Image (cartoon, grey):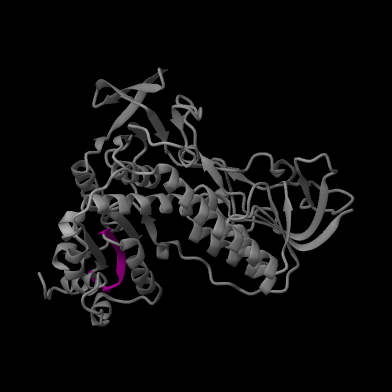
């Protein structure tokens, strides 16, 4: 028997379940179709488990450095099984919380694969959702007024290096390791590659990064890339940029690759390989062929309110490309649902979205890089300030890094803020607020930052941009 809803959401990840809660708040009868677990990639294969592992790596590193703080102790060994157990416990706790929120908001959940059907006896428009489960039960039919596609993404595979769960691994596979390898080659020096490289190096794994572009963190400001490269090399990470893998051979539980760099070929051998070269949208097998929805480079095409060519079908998150971040998907989902409910939502300004990399040191940024701003012909005024001049950073024991504040010299508008150093993924929220409020550097400097805190670096960098530094 078919069931009617105001909204059916295909995909229960961060974007999907937050959109469902907002829809419920707006009085829409809502259902989620999820083939795995509510919470999606972010909760089960991404944000939460990786940051839990990174915290264990931080504690392990701190214990090894404890004598620097006057604490004389000895680290006997790392219990990686317990590290993984803690990761699973935290993930499960949050998963239970998501289920409670869905129940509290009276949202129906269907376990299975959601597929959009074409016009049928149920509806003259494409949009009826068939729920296909692993059981032998007949498919359930959901008839919504609106559909929201939030199907997410998966690790992108290289044809020459297909995942095999043995030596060539995806980031999903890495989370299931029951032991730490002695060595690993990481293909890709973007966000995912940097986080795994940082974590594994702190766990005493020998790490080699192979990056095709001319620098690590290629989407960050050039100065951030230089700093993270310098710090990683000090950590003992081998870095190969402008490099491509031309051949590979698996033998005796190891993988040997040939890397071509600047016309020279060199062989490298490691126990494992992580391929982290981006993520591909989950758009296959969900019935898009039954609609007029447009696909470009594998991503669903939408307008500023996330409507597809079928105006009653919306799409958000990783499956539409753009900034593939959990907090972006959450906001996109909220905007889409509010648009369905005729709430006239404010459009998302992607220029105001912060990006974070949870390596050690951390990286966080918002707005334009210096190169992007110059390419747009802005006349720039830049304020740089190092963490080593901030008292609280010295107290942490790791004062490397800096903040770089980029402003329009003519209007005094903030164009970009880029940070690398301790806890910058937490500090970047102040930069986000500054962008939302259209704050100027002098207004940021005028804001009283308590002493001693890491946040003082904002006022110091702002004063630097104004040409009147105090502590440098």
For residue 308, which quarter of the picture? Answer: bottom right
In the image: residue 31, left or right of residue 211: right
Q: Is residue 330 visible?
A: yes
Where residue 214 appears, x then y in whole percent? 27, 38
The residue shown at (38%, 44%) is 79
Image quarter hosting the C terminus: bottom left
Bounds of the magenta span?
A: 409-421
Where residue 145 appears, x then y in whole percent? 77, 62
Vertical order, 429 against 32 (above or below): below
Tally of numbered tags: 0
In the image: residue 275, left or right of residue 297: left
**Membership of 419 in magenta stretch:** yes
Q: Nearer the viewer, residue 353 or 296?
A: 353
The residue shown at (37%, 42%) is 193
Where residue 81 appears, x then y in whole percent? 44, 43
In the image: residue 36, left or right of residue 7: left
For residue 338, which quarter of the picture? Answer: bottom right
Q: Nearer the viewer, residue 42 or 59?
A: 59
């Amino acid at each position: 028997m078919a069931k009617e809803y105001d909204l059916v959401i295909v995909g229960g990840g961060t974007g999907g379940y937050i959109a469902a809660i907002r829809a419920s708040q707006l009085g829409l009868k809502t259902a989620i179709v999820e083939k795995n677990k509510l919470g999606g990639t972010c909760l089960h294969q991404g944000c939460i488990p990786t940051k839990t592992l990174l915290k264990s790596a931080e504690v392990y590193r701190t214990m090894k450095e404890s004598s620097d703080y006057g604490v004389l102790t000895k680290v006997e060994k790392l219990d990686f099984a317990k590290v993984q157990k803690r990761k699973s416990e935290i993930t499960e706790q949050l998963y239970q919380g998501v289920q409670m929120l869905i129940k509290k908001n009276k949202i129906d959940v269907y376990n299975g694969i959601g597929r959009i059907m074409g016009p049928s006896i149920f509806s003259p428009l494409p949009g009826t959702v068939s729920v296909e489960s692993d059981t032998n039960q007949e498919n359930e039919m959901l008839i919504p007024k609106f559909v929201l596609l939030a199907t997410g993404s998966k690790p992108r595979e290289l044809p020459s290096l297909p995942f095999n769960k043995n030596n060539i691994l995806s980031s999903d596979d890495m989370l299931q390791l029951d032991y730490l390898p002695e060595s690993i080659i990481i293909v890709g020096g973007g966000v995912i590659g940097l986080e795994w490289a940082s974590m594994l190096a702190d766990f005493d794994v020998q790490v080699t990064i192979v990056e095709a572009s001319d620098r690590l963190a290629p989407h960050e400001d050039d100065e951030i890339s230089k700093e993270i490269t310098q710090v990683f090399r000090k950590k003992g990470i081998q870095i190969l940029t402008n490099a491509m893998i031309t051949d590979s051979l698996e033998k005796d539980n190891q993988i040997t690759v040939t890397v071509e760099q600047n016309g020279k070929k060199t062989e490298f051998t490691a126990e494992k390989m992580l391929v982290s070269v981006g993520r591909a949208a989950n758009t296959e097998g969900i019935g898009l062929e039954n609609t007029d929805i447009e696909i470009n480079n594998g991503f669903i095409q939408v307008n500023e309110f996330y409507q597809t060519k079928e105006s009653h079908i919306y799409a958000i998150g990783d499956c539409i490309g753009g900034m593939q971040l959990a907090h972006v998907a959450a906001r996109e989902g909220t905007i889409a649902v509010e648009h369905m409910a005729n709430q006239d939502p404010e459009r998302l300004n992607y220029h105001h979205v912060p990006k974070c990399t949870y390596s050690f040191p951390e990286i966080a940024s918002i707005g334009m890089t210096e190169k992007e701003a110059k390419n747009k012909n802005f006349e720039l005024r830049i304020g740089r300030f190092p963490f080593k001049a901030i008292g609280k950073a010295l107290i942490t024991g790791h004062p490397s890094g800096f903040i770089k504040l980029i402003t329009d010299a003519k209007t005094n508008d903030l164009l970009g803020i880029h940070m690398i150093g301790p806890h910058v993924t937490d500090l970047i929220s102040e930069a986000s607020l500054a962008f939302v409020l259209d704050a100027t550097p002098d207004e940021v400097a005028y804001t009283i930052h308590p002493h001693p805190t890491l946040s003082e670096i904002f006022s110091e960098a702002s004063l630097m941009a104004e040409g009147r530094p105090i502590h440098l």
